[in-house]
Amino acid sequence: MTSISQRVTGFVFSRGAGFLPFADAATPELPLSRLLRLSLFQVSVGMALVLLVGTLNRVMIVELNVPASVVAIMVSMPLFFAPFRAIIGHRSDTHKSVLGWRRVPFIWQGSLVQFGGLAIMPFAILILSGQGEMHVPVWIGHLAAGFAFLLVGAGLHTVQTVGLALATDLAPKESQPKVVGLMYVMLLFGMIVSAIIFGLLLTEFTPGRLIQVIQGAAVATLVLNTIALWKQEARRPSRLLTEEERNQKDPTFQESWAAFVQGGSAIRRLVAVGLGTAAFSMHDVLLEPYGGQILHLSVSATTKLTATLAVGGLLGFALASRVLSRGFDPFRMAFYGALVGIPAFLAVIMAAPASQPWLFVVGTSLIGFGAGLFGHGTLTATMNLAPKDQTGLALGAWGAAQATAAGFAVASGGIIRDIISNWGDQSFGPATGYIVVYSIEIVLLLAALIAMIPLLRAKATAPSKEETPASDIRPDAVPADA
């Protein structure tokens, strides 16, 4: 009976895995089961993102009557930690632990910080809105809520930065593009599933149910990240280090950063990442309002636009992973992604004067597709060109540029639309503010293309990582399952 069971299980994994997105990212060194387990940290990050920018955004404004300006400030607070992702990545590159881990301590610390923020967040929000039974000064509610949002932001930025660095350590160089694709598919999966679950649990809103949902998310964060980390990184205890290695002084962040940006190509890459990410992000808060206000689409139809954008992104990631794994230039992939974005935004702009909603749908799907190509290309290039022992720094710098640009772009998009709609020229009627924002995004894409042209013309001069065994395992290292 046991033999039959094992054969059936083996058949399911061998045949069924082929239907999973990016299943071919698995290698003998990093089997699919271990890779999927590692990617659970992206599920926890996606869950936190949905809670911050989706569920709580609506609950605080609608059910708890918190002013929209206060909600906007609270939701934007996690952005404060985005620029520190490079420092976090550098610290994980150079960390020396008695237990022999580099990445695990940072992911665990980030998980605990995220857990703490989510644990106190519902009480802070209820005090902020005046819904709690405790009568305390208003400023305490603001301070507590701000602190909770800061903790969650610090935790998720730490977990994602170091988690991606760990995935890079574990994956062979040739399979890294597919591993990147799988990690971001799991991020989208976590966001979609979390949004559905939170929506169902909060259908009948009560303060008690809000506390249960958010604190349940806190517990889920620890559970998912613990499972993701279990026996992933090899240990190299300090007793196995040579005398020379124990006495070796780690480079400072300034020294590591100077080595990373040597030659200028790294700065150009980060500029291109920032411009492209801002271009693909500025319309985020305007997508559904544009469809409803300008094209007169129903709530159901505009809600499906978000799914259309996500499907386009998944297709972009899938195509990029397949092509990049065959040795295609990641900068050229990012370049093509930015090119796709230009006709995509033009289609969205033309949908209003032409009164053709199908143009809006096509443009939205192409925006997601182009963003998928661009994001995958820039991240793969960052991983491939990271100097030896600076994977965390490189990925942190990429994440800092991306998150900061996206945050400011989203805020700028809403502000620009309001200014133009209220005080600007109304040549296109109510659509004028939206069209201005989409036009700015096209300009930003053109700027990103110009920034990437020198990267296409010449081979990258940045030092590349030397081939090392998965998970930085040395002959004298303790195996991950020890």
Image: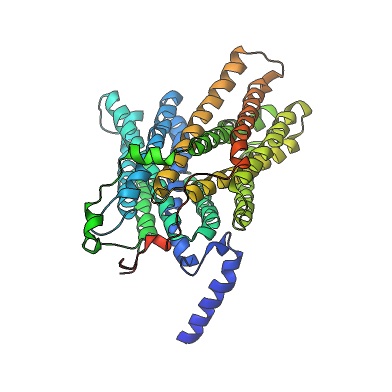
Residue shown at the point (68%, 27%) measured from the top left: 294
User: Residue 58: in sight, yes or no?
Assistant: yes
Residue shown at the point (75%, 38%) measured from the top left: 358
In depth, the one of 404 and 438 nearer the eye is: 404
Q: In this view, does 164 lie to the left or right of 474?
A: right
User: Residue 126: in sight, yes or no?
Assistant: no
* Residue at the outermost right position: 354
Seen in the picture, residue 32 relative to 159 is either above or below; the reply is below
Residue shown at the point (25%, 28%) measured from the top left: 135
In x, y percent, where is residue 61? 45, 30
In x, y percent, where is residue 100? 27, 59
In depth, the one of 381 and 199 nearer the eye is: 381
Q: Is residue 439 left or right of residue 272?
A: right
Seen in the picture, residue 479 relative to 295 is either above or below; the reply is below
* Quadrant of image for the C terminus: bottom left
In depth, the one of 261 and 140 nearer the eye is: 261
Q: Quadrant of residue 125?
A: top left
Seen in the picture, residue 389 relative to 23 is either above or below; the reply is above
In x, y percent, where is residue 54? 48, 38
Seen in the picture, residue 466 relative to 393 is either above or below; the reply is below
